[in-house]
């Protein structure tokens, strides 16, 4: 009974918001084309909506841990992390390449062939 109510609430939420409704229709279309069983509304809600992370049990952190993740995502930590990581990677690659001599580069090319 409780599971059916939760399914109805998730269904209502998915079909109310146009972006989530389109995502749901794309998933159902994909499943129909490849003879797969579509996921439940609850599963789709948790995995594919931004607010669904509050109800996820993926990390076993409970509601407040999930709230912490959600606030971090909304604050842009992942985008900031990716930018910093990319810049750091470029800088480190340049530094590493400047340390290598021509003989070392030739040896690496021979080794990779």
Image (tube, rainbow, N blue to C red):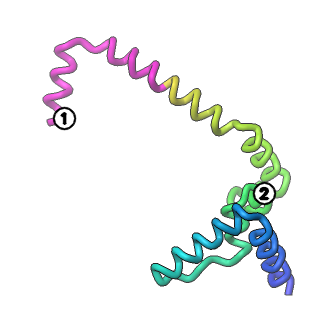
Helix, strand or loop under label 1: helix
Q: Position of residue 6 (x, y in %)?
A: 82, 77
Left or right: residue 80 versus residue 50 is: left
Quarter of the view holding residue 76: top right
Q: Is residue 22 above or below residue 28?
A: above
Q: Which residues are magenta?
A: 89-113
Which of labels 1 and 2 is toward the front? 2
**Real-space CA distance between mark 1 and mark 2, rounded to the nearest whole angstrom:** 47 Å
Q: Position of residue 75 (x, y in %)?
A: 76, 38
Residue identifier under label 1? 112
Helix, strand or loop under label 2: helix
Left or right: residue 55 versus residue 21 is: right
Residue at point 78%, 79% (across, down): 7
Q: Quadrant of the C terminus?
A: top left
Foreground: 106 or 41? Answer: 41
Q: Quadrant of the N terminus?
A: bottom right
Disc 2 crowd rating (10 Å Cα; few below 14, some 14-19, many 20+) is: some
Q: Position of residue 84 (x, y in %)?
A: 58, 27
Q: Position of residue 91 (x, y in %)?
A: 46, 19
Residue 111 highlighted magenta (yes or no): yes
Residue identifier under label 2? 51
């Amino acid at each position: 009974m409780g599971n059916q109510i939760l399914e109805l609430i998730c269904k209502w939420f998915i079909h109310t918001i146009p972006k989530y409704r389109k995502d749901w229709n794309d998933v159902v279309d994909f499943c129909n084309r490849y003879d797969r069983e579509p996921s439940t509304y609850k599963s789709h809600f948790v995995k594919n909506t931004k607010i669904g992370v509050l109800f996820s049990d993926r990390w076993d952190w409970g509601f407040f841990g999930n709230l912490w993740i959600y606030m971090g995502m909304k604050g842009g930590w992942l985008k900031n992390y990716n930018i910093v990581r990319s810049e750091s990677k470029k800088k480190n690659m340049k530094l590493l390449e400047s340390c290598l001599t021509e003989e070392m580069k030739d040896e690496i090319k021979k080794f990779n062939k």
